[in-house]
Image (cartoon, grey):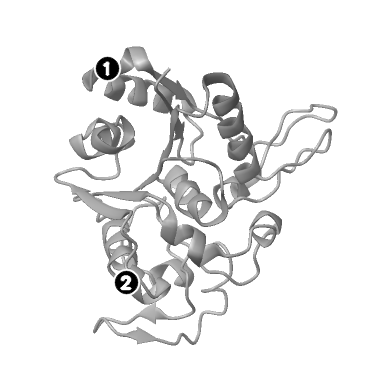
């Protein structure tokens, strides 16, 4: 096996759909025979008493520990770390590992890149609703950095680096780690709606009015957040695509980074 692609579902938990989207993309790229697609399911529903399966509620997209009452509780980020380690053990150090997620899955992937030391060759967030910023200021309409008033939680995790959860607290050096990772941000050029699934709290609205604007702002100001323009970070806008995981994974921009 040459590569393993971990694909993370959105808020509806439709991991089977995302597995199929990634398999179709690998087939279109002509690499299906050398690619393993893994689609983990981050459950959000309460598990019955005595059920050992992991479930997270909404906290899976930010690396919180699971809420199961039987067995070990584990961060969703730590679960991905374990999957990456298993892939390396099975296929050897030469296998290329990539993690991609769309929408809520894109939120997980962007934040996971700030916390994890797992050997992923690329982190690929697509159309996330919000980002974990690496500094305490936000961007005003005139493009300048400004302090924020009137939104008390704007810089707490999952929107910033205050009040970190257990996993992030155990992995210090977040800005430095994020800077050295390969992070390929993919945005739909038509993902401009303020739909029911868009985070519309003040914490997210300080990042922009829609997913396209939020992603462009976050990327454009990475050098201000990190003090350096990270060479391994790229932004690709997929023309004509809205909030559509299948079309994003099928795009040439996605195939170029997923199937190297």
Q: Left of 240 or right of it: where is 134?
A: right
Check disc 2 and report its element: helix, strand or loop: loop
The mark nearer the N terminus, 2 or 1, is 1
Residue matched to label 2: 221
For residue 258, say whether it is visible: yes
Residue matched to label 1: 27
Report, in whole angstroms, how far the alpha carbon at label 2 lies from the one at label 1: 36 Å
Work out whether 237 lies above or below 68: below
**Badge 2 local density, few (<14 within 10 Å), some, or many (20+)?**
some
**Badge 1 local density, few (<14 within 10 Å), some, or many (20+)?**
few
Work out whether 125 lies above or below 91: below
Residue at image position (49%, 66%) is 175
Name the residue at the top extreme. Answer: 33
Give the percent coordinates (x, y) of residue 110.
Answer: 45, 52
Give the percent coordinates (x, y) of residue 21.
Answer: 34, 25
Residue at image position (34%, 62%) is 230
Work out whether 30 lies above or below 124: above
Q: Left of 8 or right of it: where is 86?
A: right
Nearer to me, 74 or 202: 74
Q: Left of 118 or right of it: where is 207?
A: left
**Looking at the figure, which quarter contains the C terminus?**
top left
Work out whether 233 lies above or below 104: below
Nearer to me, 53 or 137: 137
* Rendering quarter of residue 46: top right
Name the residue at the left extreme. Answer: 239
Give the percent coordinates (x, y) of residue 59.
Answer: 62, 50
* Rendering quarter of residue 220: bottom left
Residue at image position (42%, 46%) is 106
Check disc 1 and report its element: helix, strand or loop: helix
């Amino acid at each position: 096996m040459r590569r393993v692609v971990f694909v993370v579902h959105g808020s509806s938990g439709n991991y089977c759909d995302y597995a199929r989207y990634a398999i179709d993309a690998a087939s279109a790229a002509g690499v299906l025979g050398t690619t393993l697609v893994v689609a983990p399911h981050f459950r959000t529903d309460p598990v019955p008493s005595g059920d050992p399966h992991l479930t997270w509620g909404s906290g899976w997209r930010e690396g919180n520990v699971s809420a199961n009452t039987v067995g070990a509780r584990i961060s969703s980020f730590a679960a991905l770390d374990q999957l990456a380690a298993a892939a390396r053990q099975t296929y050897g150090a030469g296998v290329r590992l990539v993690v991609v997620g769309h929408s809520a899955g894109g939120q997980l992937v962007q934040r996971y890149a700030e916390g994890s030391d797992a050997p992923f060759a690329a982190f690929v967030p697509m159309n996330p609703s919000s980002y974990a910023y690496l500094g305490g200021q936000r961007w005003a309409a005139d493009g300048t950095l400004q302090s924020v008033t009137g939104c008390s939680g704007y810089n707490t995790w999952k929107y910033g680096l205050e009040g970190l959860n257990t996993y992030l607290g155990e992995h210090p050096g977040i800005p430095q780690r994020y800077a050295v990772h390969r992070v390929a941000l993919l945005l739909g050029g038509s993902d401009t709606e303020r739909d029911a699934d868009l985070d519309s709290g003040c914490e997210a609205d300080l990042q922009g009015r829609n997913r396209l604007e939020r992603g462009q702002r976050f990327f454009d100001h990475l050098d201000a957040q990190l003090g350096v323009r990270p060479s391994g970070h790229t932004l690709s806008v997929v023309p004509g695509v809205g909030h559509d995981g299948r079309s994003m994974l099928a795009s040439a921009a996605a195939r170029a980074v997923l199937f190297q």
